[in-house]
Image (tube, rainbow, N blue to C red):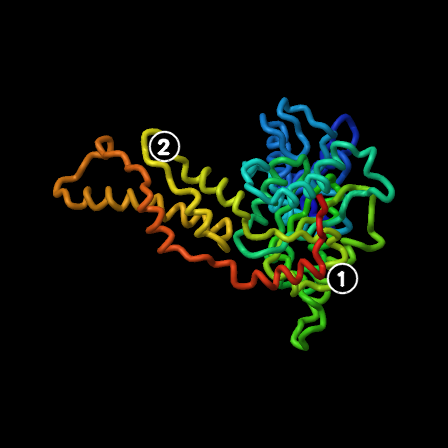
Amino acid sequence: MFYDAKFGRKKVKELENDQTTEKPVSNGSSSSNNGHVQNTSDMAIYEQYRSQGSSSTHSNGTLSNGISERPQKPLLPPLESADSRALAESLCRDIIRGSPDVKWESIKGLENAKRLLKEAVVMPIKYPKYFTGLLSPWKGILLFGPPGTGKTMLAKAVATECKTTFFNISASSVVSKWRGDSEKLIKVLFELARHHAPSTIFLDEIDAIISQRGEARSEHEASRRLKTELLIQMDGLTQSDELVFVLAATNLPWELDAAMLRRLEKRILVPLPEPEARRAMFESLLPSQTGEENLPYDLLVEKTEGYSGSDIRLLCKEAAMQPLRRLMTLLEDKQEVVPEDELPQVGPIRPGDIEAALKNTRPSAHLHAHRYEKFNADYGSQILQ
């Protein structure tokens, strides 16, 4: 028995059939057929990845009947060092394997943004024959607009509906305290995405990762290296024929670097909901009940000008709380404790509850609407019908 300093594991020499063979002692790692050493944690992630792909619902390019559209690949691509392998293993945790369960139909309005996302992600996979040469798929799309308008919901719809490997990346995924690891994480991320292509990399709040360079003297060198590596990976000499699509979202598009704006070829404004979209939201969240007074949807649409989708949901929640508060008052007045199976039903929502909710709820995303309109006029991608 001796200690191998290169791989950090013990080996035992055994004599079988007059031939000397070496067998590794199990100490938390296993050797694959190609000679690469794989950690047990890596194998656990890989088994989870395979079992998720063979489930009843399609995920990452697997059909509902369990038959994969493309052959299974190892979880990690061939990497140049053990450090890169460890970084790739940490990034694999950001792969969305379960379905967020957000359909295109559940997003009210935003038809232009949904059509462009289908054009960029769904159609190149469905009809790859047409998307070649000059018609190659879009490399990146930027969704910008006020907070609460549905940018992240669109990303969830892409993860649910599109048969791609979905990487949900935030600043915590690619920023490291160790010198040089941040740019290595960016490089390994795109290597993973190309390995599992077709892939979608979702960069939420991208302004926290790649704001304008050289604006302030206090910009750290590590931050600048990370930004440069991201720009190189998106559009550099490392380009390949694999379909890797970058989807970014931000509330502050005017703080993005100009080089990143060029790489995000389509810049789509996700505006505050139109009257038709607001009415559809109210009818979905506050449906009219049979035998009860109809809710004033026209009043709601008129009074919620400037509300975001998140504000409208909060307004509906406030209206739904009114009958519950009345019921809570009755239950609290009783001295005895009511068993759970004997609790009365919550009453219907009245038109007066709607008026009370309108007084208690204010819009939160209308203050900088003019800045988004100006940015859209300068840099936005206008979609002609």
Q: Residue at 35% of width from left, 43% of height from top?
A: 320
Q: Identify the image quadrant of the N terminus.
A: top right
Q: Position of residue 220 (x, y in %)?
A: 67, 71
Identify the residue position indicated by label 2 in the image: 289
Q: Amino acid at mark 2?
A: Gln
Number of marks in the rendered image: 2
Q: Residue furthest left?
A: 335
262 or 358: nearer the viewer: 358
- In the rendered structure, the answer to whether residue 156 lies left or right of residue 23 reads left
Q: Position of residue 187 (x, y in %)?
A: 74, 54
Q: Residue at 73% of width from left, 54% of height from top?
A: 264
Identify the residue position indicated by label 1 in the image: 259
Residue 126 quadrant: top right
Q: Is residue 121 visible?
A: yes
Q: Amino acid at mark 1?
A: Ala
239 or 153: nearer the viewer: 153
